[in-house]
Amino acid sequence: MYKITEIVAAELNYLELESPDGQSKAKICLNQGGSLSKFVFETIQILADYNSACYLDTYASSILFPFANRIKNGEYTFNNLKYKFQCNEIDKNNALHGFVYNKPFDVIDRVTTQEYASVTLCYKDEGKTEGFPFKFSIELTYQLNKNGLILSIKALNNDKNPFPFSIGWHPYFYSKNLDNSALNFKSDTKYVYDNQQIISSTTELDIEMPFQLKGVKLDTGYPLKTNEIQFSTPKYNMNLRSTSKENFLQLYTPDRQNIVAIEPMTGATDNFNNKIGLQTLQPNETYHVKWSIAIEPCNTHTNQLIN
């Protein structure tokens, strides 16, 4: 039987999902935006073990809503009205990663069976945030199962007015040796950025797949041609799939060794302005997206990279 355990550590509240044999675990922090702070699959470390005290610097596994990545100068126009977020990326003068990443989430459901454990968390916003005067709620459902992990997100417009949005996720994946690891995804374009890390143009993607990560430094975005991203490491192969109609990828290598952020998104950076992948949620309308992570330890090798 899968199980769910409540944990309190460093004044933070967590729920830990655990497989019957105790070899797979997923730990979610309720106080830090419902973020996934730990993921171990069949004793293999999948996510980087960032300290929770560094969360506001790393945004590790944070849910990015109502926008993913950046908004230039925090400013945008929607339905002929101008809005301005507070800029939390001070050095570049941008609004960064939405504003639910540090909100407390409530537990509204939990399920344990022989096949999986799942928890559903909810945050309700009353439209008081500067730059986004719209009421909404967002639900996150994490499911740990024999294949890996599924994150399902549901956003509901509780306002009388429509609002723009995109959604992203910011997990940092750990490899025992990043120099001996590779990514695989289908794209023919990468974004070019200005000095604020805002899209200024596009250029042809000049890398071959699988994309070998030896000696590579990344902070780059790509529009994807499929809903699939794969990551191969010495210990495990990962397949990340999305249910979004449009899919975008942001890759980032932090200063720490053997870690890469693989960030699936439903829209590009600054899309409140450039409209790339931007969607509108009407009053009482609900948007769903699901990201599924399938993990296979390297001794099985049945999960092949995209050809």
Image (cartoon, rainbow, N blue to C red):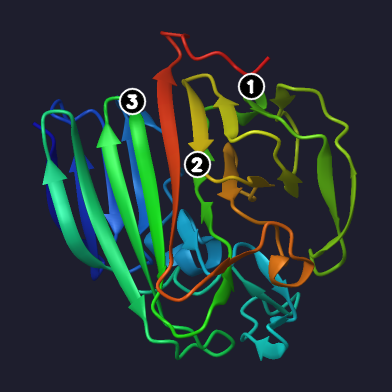
Is residue 127 depicted above or below 262 in this figure? below
Instruction: Judge from the rendering whether residue 188 lies leftward or rightward of residue 156; answer left or right.
Output: right
Q: Which residue is mark 3?
A: 147
- Classify 161 as above or below 151: below
Element type at mark 3:
loop
Total of numbered circles in the picture?
3
Residue at figure coordinates x 45%, y 91% from the top left: 128
Residue at image coords 88%, 32%: 206
- The residue under the point 63% across, 50% down is 254
Quarter of the image where one finds residue 283? bottom left
Give the class, few, some or many, for how many residues have Cα within 10 Å of label 2's Cα (few <14, many ≥20): some
Of residues 204 and 210, which is closer to you in this image?
204
Q: Which residue is mark 2?
A: 243
Residue beneath label 1, please? 180
Q: Position of residue 205 (x, y in %)?
A: 85, 36
| Residue positioned most to the left | 1
